[in-house]
Image (cartoon, rainbow, N blue to C red):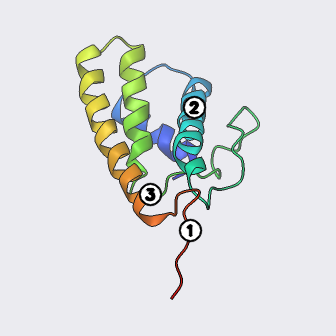
Amino acid sequence: MTILEAITLADLDRPNEISVERKLQWLSTLDGRIYRELMLTYDDAPPAFSGYDEQTELRTTELMVGFPFDDLYLRYLVLRIDLEQGELERYNNDAAAFNRVWKSYATNYGRTHVPLGVQHLTF
């Protein structure tokens, strides 16, 4: 999923007046956390992630988490939109949905990658 796709889907789901720049910051923060808190704990971590900024091409830049877990971005953006707009009941529901997708992604990532410091066994 590209940055623009995630923002467009979130805006369709939760019409709002929040700037694209603000949503880009949110996505940058989320991918930064995914990179530092999850990916860096495994042997095959991708190259360094330095975040997204105004120079980032929104139409072509792929977010870190791919299919089938890319719903993570929509869930995150709508929860941030609801929090920003003071929709606390919606925010709580969105946070629960985000946490379910995050947990599923993190579990799958852990099953499919080798943690740092683990010796590979060969027979």
Residue at the limit of the structure toward the bottom, as seen here: 123
In percent of width and height, residue 38 lies at 51, 46
| Marked residue nearer the N-terminal end (1 or 3) | 3
Tell me whether the residue at label 3 lies in contact with that at label 2, contact meaning CB atoms closer than 8 angstroms.
no
Q: Callout 1 environment at 10 Å: few (<14), some (14 to 19), or many (20+)?
A: few
Q: Callout 3 environment at 10 Å: few (<14), some (14 to 19), or many (20+)?
A: some
Residue wearing tag 2: 29
User: How far is disc 3 from disc 2 in space, using C-alphas?
Assistant: 19 Å
Residue wearing tag 3: 109
In percent of width and height, residue 97 lies at 27, 37
In percent of width and height, residue 30 lies at 53, 35
Please name the amino acid that badge 1 sits on: Gln
Residue wearing tag 1: 119
Q: State the residue at coordinates (30%, 22%).
A: 91
Q: Callout 2 environment at 10 Å: few (<14), some (14 to 19), or many (20+)?
A: some
Q: Nearer the viewer, mark 3 or mark 2?
A: 3
| Marked residue nearer the N-terminal end (2 or 1) | 2
Compared to 74, does 114 lie above or below?
A: below
Residue 11 position by quadrant: top left
**In terms of depth relative to the viewer, which is nearer, 52 or 119?**
119
Q: In the image, is 41 to the left or to the right of 67?
A: right
Q: In the image, is 56 to the left or to the right of 21?
A: right
Mark linked to residue 15: none
Please name the amino acid that badge 3 sits on: Tyr
User: How far is disc 2 from disc 1 in space, using C-alphas?
Assistant: 32 Å
| Marked residue nearer the N-terminal end (3 or 2) | 2
